[in-house]
Image (cartoon, grey):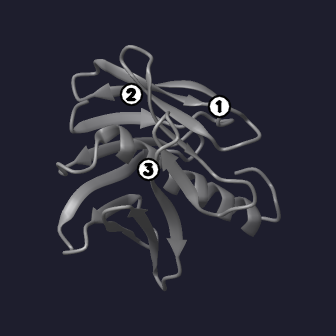
Amino acid sequence: MDKCVYFNDNFFSSGKTDIYNESQEKLGEIDLKSTFGSSLNVENEKGEVVVEGSFPFFSSRWNIKKPDGNELGEVKSSFAFFSKRYHYLTNNAAYEIESPAFSKEYTILDENKAEVATFKKVNGFFQSAAFELKNYSDSLSTEELIAVVMGVNAIEKRNNSSASGGAVT
């Protein structure tokens, strides 16, 4: 898959949504499996599931795995003042995901603080969130990073929902 892709969430977080490159060519799809859950599949252009993402039962961590069940890593929220901070922990490495408090732009850094990817929300006020992802890494696939971005989005939606007293945001 290309190193720069565009994709979006659906308003009710269910159904399929396309993954595009900069030339607006379709590269695959994200299958947002249910309105009532937050699981998804990232599919290639042939419709084959490449990566899965979901919250385990009663967990605030977003798990990412291959279709065969082999776990790739997990995204978790970290406490931070005046910024948004997450960690993506894999078997081989730990990545930090950070963004200034009111920004829609995120940076993914490796253990040496080198930038491995960036993503940003390109809309989302009265419509579902859309993202631009740029992958600079040789060790993380674009499909895996899409699941990471959607995990950060799912954690933020959960946090916003609980902060507003359970209303859907």
Decide which of 22, 141 is in the foreground and name it. 141
Decide which of 123, 58 is in the foreground and name it. 58
Which label sits on residue 87?
A: none
Residue at 28% across, 18% down: 25
Residue at 53% across, 81% down: 79
List the single residue furthest toward the top.
Answer: 46
Left-right relation of 142 to 72: left
Amino acid on which the number 1 mark rests in the picture: Lys
Q: Residue at label 1?
A: 33
Q: Residue at label 3?
A: 149
Question: Secondary structure beneath disc 1?
Answer: loop
Q: CA distance from mark 1 to mark 3?
A: 16 Å
Sequence-first disc among 2 and 3: 2
User: Does 99 appear above or below 127?
Assistant: below
List the single residue furthest toward the bottom.
Answer: 81
Q: Position of residue 12 (x, y in %)?
A: 69, 35
Which label sits on residue 19?
A: 2
